[in-house]
Amino acid sequence: MQQQTVLAAGQVLAGPGGEVIRNGAVLVRDDTITATGPRVEVERLAEPSAVRLDFPDGTLLPGLIDAHVHLALDAGPDPVASLLATSDDDLYPQMAARAERLLAAGVTTARDLGDRGGLAVRLRDEIAAGNRPGPRLLSAGTPLTGPGGHCWFLGGEVEGEDAIRAAVRRNASNGVDLIKVMATGGGITKGGPPVWQAQFTPHEMNVIVAEARRAGLPVAAHAHGTEGIEAAVAAGVDTIEHCTWMARDGFDVREDLVAALADRGIAVCPAASPDWRGFAERFGTERAEEMFRRIRWMAQRGVRLLPGTDAGISRAVFDGFVASLEFFLHIGMTPPDVIDTATVHAAAALGLARRTGRLAPGHRADLLVVDGNPLTDLTALRAPHLVVAAGRPYTPATPATPAPNA
């Protein structure tokens, strides 16, 4: 028997641009939104037996989307060492617990960009079946990297065109939602190539994207260095992660590539850690602000930005999504802009525009209820009263991470 639920709130953020319905409500049947509007109108459509949840002082809004997490990593001082010391049997329940922490923070969709042994795919399916609490997961499976390259320990080392094609096909056959490629080096891989150095030739990047397209899969490219960014853009990836424009001797920002990102609709996920303020202190305030200004500049030139925490990397905790969203306030966005970035715009960039990101009939019932008004104070998102993912209600047991000092 199908179950109806009416969720009513003092205000409902139904769509983009800060669209508000005062004294609004959403009608949910099983896992799907069937109506959104003023409460009196929604109530007319509800059956007498419908469950009714009322939050007169709260705000109801779409569930949040974290586009860059690593459930296999523990966010501790040395997440790679912890991973290498943990068996798959022990790692899987840890990943499940981290997914639940994402859900408790209001995240109803998360993109896992690199795990080991297909564990994120297994967890995705368990969550989808209702066997474990968590957000919808989009899993990249094992990321492609060069021999001894960034995140080699996840098992995705490839060399040569044949090995590249085989790795993409293997991931596809394992049921991944996208392909992840480490286009450049990265910071957590000890002894690996420097972050600015490209790991694949332009031809190899083309092969990766072409093989992914044959399998009907999008491609996310980890790229700090400009050379890797250029190859990823030319190959036609769907998203670029980090995009910090690093070169051997500093930074090398290419305005032509920024224009191409905007023109081709390639979204950029800066993957701003919840500890982005601490990162700025450790990296150097002036250098960090230069990097932050670059992200602001890209947005001003029409590049779509994606929210992502890089959760699992040291200090990037799984319940700190709102702290990462505050990074976008820092670079000049307004709270309504940030909410749109984390909902409707992220859904569109990840190919989910018809399924989530707004409270619209026919969309999956992904939503959360918070106190106060996040359109004027984003910290209202820090303590959800209720999170609903695929129509399943979840009440966070503990308060969200407190706001850090600005």
Image: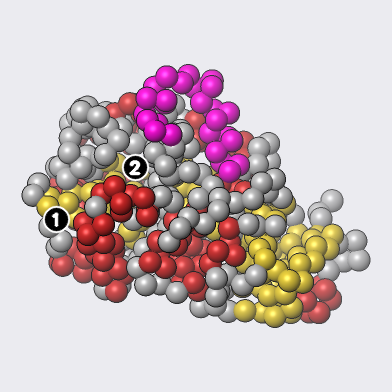
> Which numbered disc flags the more N-terminal residue, 1 or 2?
2
Q: Which residue is drawn at 55% across and 74% down?
A: 375
- The reply to whether residue 366 is visible in this rendering is no
Foreground pick, 86 / 127:
86
Q: What element carries label 2?
A: strand
Q: Which of marks 1 and 2 is in front?
A: 1
- Tags 1 and 2 touching, CB below 8 Å: no
Residue type (three-letter) at the residue carrying disc 2: Lys
The residue carrying mark 2 is 180
Classify residue 3 by image quadrant.
bottom right
Q: State the count of labels.
A: 2
**On the rendered image, what quadrant is the C terminus found in?**
bottom left
Q: Is residue 125 above or below residue 360?
A: above
- The reply to whether residue 185 is visible in this rendering is yes
Classify residue 146 by image quadrant.
top left
The residue carrying mark 1 is 251
Q: Give the range drawn in magenta.
A: 76-101
Q: Residue at x 65, y 70 (%)?
A: 372
The answer to if 364 sits in the magenta stretch is no
Foreground pick, 57 / 69:
57
* Residue ranking furthest to the front: 405
